[in-house]
Amino acid sequence: MCCTILVTGCAGFIGYHVTKQLLERKYRIIGIDNLNSYYDVQLKKDRLEQLNGNTHFKFYLSSMEDKESFEQVFEAYPITYVIHLAAQAGVRYSLIHPDAYIQSNMIGFFNLLEACKKHSCEHLIYASSSSVYGGNKEVPFSTKDNVDHPISLYAATKKSNELMAHTYSHLYRLPTTGLRFFTVYGPWGRPDMAYYLFSKNLVEHKPIQLYNYGEMLRDFTYVDDVVESVIRIMPIKPKPYKDGYTLKDCSKSTAPYKIYNIGRGHPVEIELVLALLEEKLGKKAIKNYEPIQPGDVVKTYAEVEELNHVIQYQPKTSIEEGLDAFVQWFIKYHQIN
């Protein structure tokens, strides 16, 4: 057994896949999740059921904002790395439930930083989001871009996480790496995401809303590619930049701190995604074209050369291959004839 890794949000979409892959590589995993009801709790339990049979896996039902119970996990195990994937997700949900984002994404992240500091965690890897780029027009999105103008509370909390992590890296020399994920998709995915909603409405013969009148592009990144990237980053602790830095270039921080994009670097039209799902599911969509929604961005597109150079890995799964894997799982999981 290599070492002990704490994975928060282990019953979530990315957290489940990261945990599963680490267990297959013989790591000891401590998993934390609160199984909240933002989307179908049964799906989270079913993911967790896939993990529970492994003797190297220990699960704790706990919320990040519960500092006392969270601290007990660090007291009980010699945790080497933390992969923090627990968060309140969703841009539109943040418009009507803002308090959930402050509790989970802000207070919960603060508790995590404090625990990592106290117990001398070797490396904290945490999920940020492509949402931090807000309404940036210049593409591809680079980690050197200014991200001071988020357009949703969700994005603001993720940007705040990056700032908090930098502070702890600077003050306490805690190595931290933030990962700006770009539209992660695949089997066991989140039901609130467009490709999943499209599939559900296709098989149920329900209308599909295409926002911004269908003129949306996303840098779809297949979950297995994301997981491989995360695991390769884990042992690569960021080093301080010796010659100082400017606020415009987070890659030159004097703290052991780093930010990377994780995307495929190839934006795809939302209507193409729907067309592929129509073909794979053998259904015809009922399309409703709607205006862009508050908090939405028109296009996401990741610059990934720096990450690829560091970890020697390029996300490569095409949208056709990724959706095919998702549809096969979707049909089996939902028992669709």
Image (cartoon, rainbow, N blue to C red):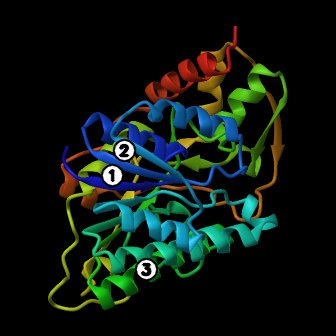
Q: Element type at marker 3?
A: helix
Q: Residue at x 24, y 38 (%)?
A: 26
Q: Residue at x 29, y 34 (%)?
A: 24
Q: State how far apart marks 3 and 2 are (Cα).
A: 26 Å
Q: Element type at marker 1?
A: helix
In the displayed structure, does residue 2 sit left or right of residue 42? left
Decide if residue 186 is in sight here.
yes
Q: How many marks?
A: 3
Q: Residue at x 69, y 13 (%)?
A: 336
Residue 316 to residue 90: above or below: above
Residue 109 to residue 9: above or below: below
In the displayed structure, does residue 71 sit left or right of residue 200? left
Disc 3 versus disc 2: nearer the observer: 3
In the displayed structure, does residue 297 sit left or right of residue 324? right
Residue 310: give x, y in percent of width and height. Answer: 19, 58
The numbered disc on residue 114 is 3
Query: Which of the image's four quarters has the N terminus?
Result: top left
Who comes first in sequence, dot 3 or dot 1? 3
Residue 334 to residue 122: above or below: above
Decide if residue 135 is in sight here.
no
The reply to whether dot 3 and dot 2 touch (C-beta < 8 Å) is: no
Judging by the rendered image, the residue that carries numbered circle 2 is: 227
The numbered disc on residue 230 is 1
Q: Looking at this rendering, what residue extends furthest in the top direction?
A: 337
For the residue pair 276 and 227, the one nearer the viewer reads as 227
Question: Where on the picture, by quarter, is residue 27?
Answer: top left
The reply to whether dot 2 and dot 1 touch (C-beta < 8 Å) is: yes
